[in-house]
Image: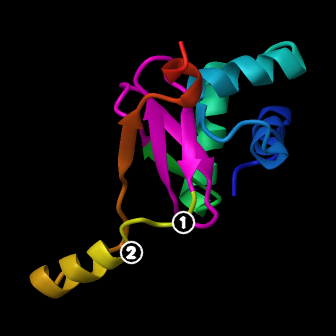
């Protein structure tokens, strides 16, 4: 567990508040600075790294060149709008059967997977 500090406490609070589903380090840093008035970027990074190591959050790759993080609870996939970039959680795991098939065909023990759907959200499609 990360050493208690105002910055790490604020990062934990941001994830716990569930105001936002996914956070990049830049977004977390901006939110922490907004809440505390100042925060070193590296301290925010260390807080996130500590939370990831303890398993309370995990990384998500959205293919945009940034690392995003979310609370580690119930596996699910994501869909990203090609027009506005909005990301929405897809409830449940759509690859559950595929994981079994991969395990059967390769002998690997599947420990994780990520799937990102892309498309156009209803708001952008209506334009």
11 shown above or below 4: above
Indicate left or right for 13 with 79 as reference: right
Where the N terminus falls, by quadrant? bottom right
Badge 1 element: loop
Mark 2, residue position: 96
Find the magenta span and give its range: 61-90
Query: Residue at the front extreme?
Result: 126
Is 23 or 78 nearer to us in this picture?
Answer: 78
| Picture residue at 48% right of the left edge, 46% below the top | 78
**Percent from the top left, x then y, of residue 71?**
65, 53
Locate residue 7: give its quadrant: top right
| Picture residue at 38% right of the left edge, 75% below the top | 96
**Percent from the top left, x then y, of residue 4?**
82, 46
Q: For mark 2, does the 10 Å Cα neighbourhood hold few (<14), some (14 to 19), or many (20 or more) residues? A: few
Q: Are marks 1 and 2 in contact (CB under 8 Å)?
A: yes
Locate residue 92: give its quadrant: bottom right
Q: CA distance from mark 1 to mark 2?
A: 9 Å
User: Where residue 92 is drawn, which disc sits there?
Assistant: 1
Indicate left or right for 121 with 98 as reference: right
6 shown above or below 123: below
Is 60 or 30 nearer to us in this picture?
Answer: 60
Q: Is residue 39 visible?
A: no
Indicate left or right for 56 with 63 as reference: right
Badge 2 element: helix
Residue 37 located within the stretch drawn in magenta: no
Is 25 or 110 nearer to us in this picture?
Answer: 110
**Percent from the top left, x then y, of residue 107?**
15, 85
Q: Is residue 19 visible?
A: yes
User: Where residue 48 is drawn, which disc sits there?
Assistant: none
119 shown above or below 31: below
Locate residue 108: give its quadrant: bottom left
**Percent from the top left, x then y, of residue 16?**
81, 49
């Amino acid at each position: 567990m990360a050493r208690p500090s105002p910055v790490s406490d604020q990062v934990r609070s941001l994830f716990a508040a569930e105001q936002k589903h996914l956070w990049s380090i830049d977004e977390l840093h901006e939110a922490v600075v907004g809440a505390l008035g100042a925060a070193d970027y590296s301290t925010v990074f260390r807080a996130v790294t500590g939370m990831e190591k303890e398993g309370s959050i995990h990384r998500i790759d959205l293919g945009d060149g940034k690392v995003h993080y979310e609370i580690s609870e119930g596996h699910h996939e994501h869909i990203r709008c090609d027009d506005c970039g909005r990301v929405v959680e897809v409830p449940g795991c759509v690859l559950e059967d595929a994981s079994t098939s991969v395990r059967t065909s390769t002998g690997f023990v599947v420990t994780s997977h990520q799937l990102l759907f892309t498309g156009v959200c209803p708001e952008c499609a209506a334009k």
